[in-house]
């Protein structure tokens, strides 16, 4: 679907065009073929901020299918990326993600993970004392997504790259996709989808089309399976 400036509403999904058709001459195929790329932790943080959900309760395949259907795109593949907790450091969330990964694989979702990195950090307290906390960091997920978006564009695997993330580090990917579209003389679109409440400051990835997902839409795509233990309902 070609979007030419302005704002367009499709059902409950709000699309704001940041980067139009990447080539002025080639026309989009009918229907455009899409691959969705999920930054698992980025999407969770967005849903927590917008809707106050305390754990990753979304179903990636349902979300991708819903967005693509409303845009008139044909979903070809769903790909999911996240950092993976160490079982000795974080056994509860290691179990959660193992169970969720297993279900996603059964649903035909491609999954990719990297081990989280843990380190001790010193925090200064108001009393003047210091306290040591154990922190974890996710490394390399945005790089892996970027590489796959570019690699699959070169292989002509999609016409639309649908990225569920607000990570501005992926802006350079949008610029590279523009170059690939010119080199291949074909229509390619890149869009970023993210949960949205009311703040106009919430932004998608620069130089992509923004697809704002409201709570009603998100709730239609919640995974009915809760992989958490009933004895421990904390956020990851």
Image (cartoon, rainbow, N blue to C red):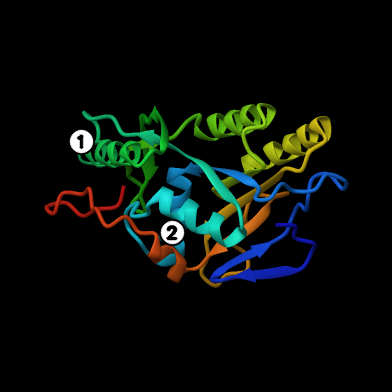
Q: Quadrant of the N terminus?
A: bottom right
- What x and y, as percent, mark residue 185? 83, 35
Q: Is residue 119 above or below residue 59?
A: above
Relative image position of residue 76 (x, y in whole percent): 53, 41
What residue sits right under mark 2 in the picture? 47
The image shows residue 61 at horizontal and vertical percentages of 42, 48
* Residue occupied by mark 1: 91
Residue at position x 43%, y 45% from top?
41
Element carrying mark 2: helix
Which residue lies most toward the right here?
25
Q: Quadrant of residue 158?
A: top right
Give the answer, above or below, for where 115 lies relative to 36: above
Q: Earlier in the sequence, mark 2 or mark 1?
A: 2
User: Which disc number belongs to residue 113?
Assistant: none
Task: Give neighbour class at mark 1: few <14, some 14-19, many 20+ (Cα, 10 Å).
Answer: few
Q: Nearer the viewer, residue 95 or 135?
A: 95
Label 1: element kind:
helix
Specify whether 112 is left or right of 26. Answer: left
- Examine the image and state in which quarter residue 221 appears: bottom left
């Amino acid at each position: 679907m070609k979007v030419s400036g302005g704002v367009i509403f499709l059902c409950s999904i709000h699309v704001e065009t940041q980067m139009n058709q990447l080539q002025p001459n080639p026309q989009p195929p009918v229907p455009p073929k899409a691959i969705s790329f999920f930054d698992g932790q980025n999407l969770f943080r967005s849903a927590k901020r917008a809707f106050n959900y305390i754990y990753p309760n979304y179903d990636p395949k349902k979300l991708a299918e819903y967005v693509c259907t409303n845009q008139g795109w044909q979903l070809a593949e769903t790909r999911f990326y996240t950092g993976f907790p160490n079982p000795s450091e974080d056994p509860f969330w290691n179990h959660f993600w193992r169970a969720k990964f297993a279900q996603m694989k059964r649903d035909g979702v491609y999954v990719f993970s990297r081990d989280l990195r843990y380190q001790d950090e010193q925090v200064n307290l108001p009393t003047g004392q210091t306290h040591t906390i154990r922190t974890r960091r996710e490394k390399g997920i945005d790089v892996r997504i970027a590489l796959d978006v570019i690699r699959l564009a070169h292989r002509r695997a999609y016409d639309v790259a649908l990225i569920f993330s607000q990570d501005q580090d992926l802006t350079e990917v949008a610029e590279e996709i523009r170059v690939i579209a010119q080199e291949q003389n074909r229509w390619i679109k890149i869009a970023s989808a993210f949960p949205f409440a009311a703040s106009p400051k919430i932004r998608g990835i620069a130089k992509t089309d923004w697809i704002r997902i409201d709570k009603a839409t998100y709730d239609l795509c919640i995974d009915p399976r809760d992989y958490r233990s009933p004895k421990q309902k904390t956020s990851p």
